[in-house]
Amino acid sequence: MRARTIISIGLLVTIAAVWLLTLPVLKIVLHVDDVQLPATPAAGEKSSPEHVRVPLSRVSTRMCQAILSAEDRHFYEHHGVDPFGLLRASIDNWKAGHMVEGASTITQQLAKVMFLDQRERTAERKLKQLIIADQLEQRYSKDRILETYLNEIYFGRGAYGIENAAQKYFAVPASKLSLAQSAFLAGLVRRPSDLGSPARLEEATERQHQVLDNMMQCGYITADDAAAAKDEKLKFRGGR
C-alpha cells in the first residue's frame, strides 16, 4: 500500500512537471489575451454601494491569514499553480471521504471569477484558467492578486467583496474584522450561497472551525487563539 502511494505521488509530480514545461506552447495554441486587473481603489475613492472595493491595507491581517489558510496556504510560494497543493488536497479529501480542501490556488480562482464563463465546464476552460493564472502571476505582485481576489469573490447573501461581506454579516469594516469573524467569512468562500444562508449556520460554524484549525497549522494563531475564537458567540448584523 505504501509503495503504491509513493508511485502515485511520483506520477502526479511528473505530470505536473510536464504540464509546466509545456505551458508556453499551450499559450500560443489557445491565444489567450493578456488580462488586466481593475485599478486599485485610491484613498477616499467612492465605489458603488453594491460593490465597495478596498486596498489590502484596509483588510484586517486576520482576514488575510484566514483566507490564505482556507484557500491557498502556499500562495506566496507558488507561481499560480501548486502541484504539491493539488496532491495534498487530493490526499486530505480522500482521507476525509469528502471535500475538505480545495485544489485551485487563489490566482486560479481569481482567473475563473473575473475572466471566464462560470457556467462552462470543459477541459478547455480549465486550461484557460491555468494559463490566465500564470499570466496574472507574471504581471502582478502577490499582494495585488490577493487584494483583487478579496474584492471580487462572493461571500453569499448578495455580498461581493470583503468590505461588503464584513458590513453585511457583522456591520463592521473589513479593517476591523476579528479572528472569529474572519474565519467565518473565509469559510463561506467555497460554498457561499449555501453556507451564507442563516438556515445553514451550523454548517458554516463547522467550516469556521476548520479554518481556525488550518490557521493554527499554518502558524498564524496558537491553539488558545483557536479555542477562544471557536467559543466566541458571533453577533450578526440585525441579530440573525
Image (cartoon, rainbow, N blue to C red):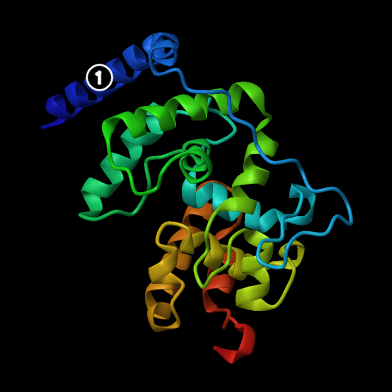
Say whether residue 80 is left or right of residue 145.
Answer: left
Residue type at tag 1: Gly
Say whether residue 61 is left or right of residue 67.
Answer: right
Query: In percent of the image, x 38 and y 70: which residue is there?
Result: 194
Could you say where residue 137 lies in the image, as x and y percent from the top left? Answer: 59, 26
Query: In percent of the image, x 63 and y 42: which residue is there?
Result: 146
Please state which of residues 63 and 158 is positioned toward the viewer in this rendering. 158
Could you say where residue 59 lies in the image, as x and y percent from the top left? Answer: 73, 56
Q: Give residue 50's quadrant in the image.
A: bottom right
Say whether residue 235 is left or right of residue 1.
Answer: right
Could you say where residue 53 lies in the image, as x and y percent from the top left? Answer: 72, 55
Could you say where residue 83 lies in the image, as x and y percent from the top left? Answer: 38, 27
Say whether residue 121 is left or right of residue 112.
Answer: left
SS for tag 1?
helix
Residue 216's place in the image compared with 21, above or below, is below
> Is residue 183 among what the camera can see?
yes
Looking at this view, name the residue that lies furthest to the bottom. 239
> Is residue 220 among what the camera can see?
no
**Which residue is the site of mark 1?**
10
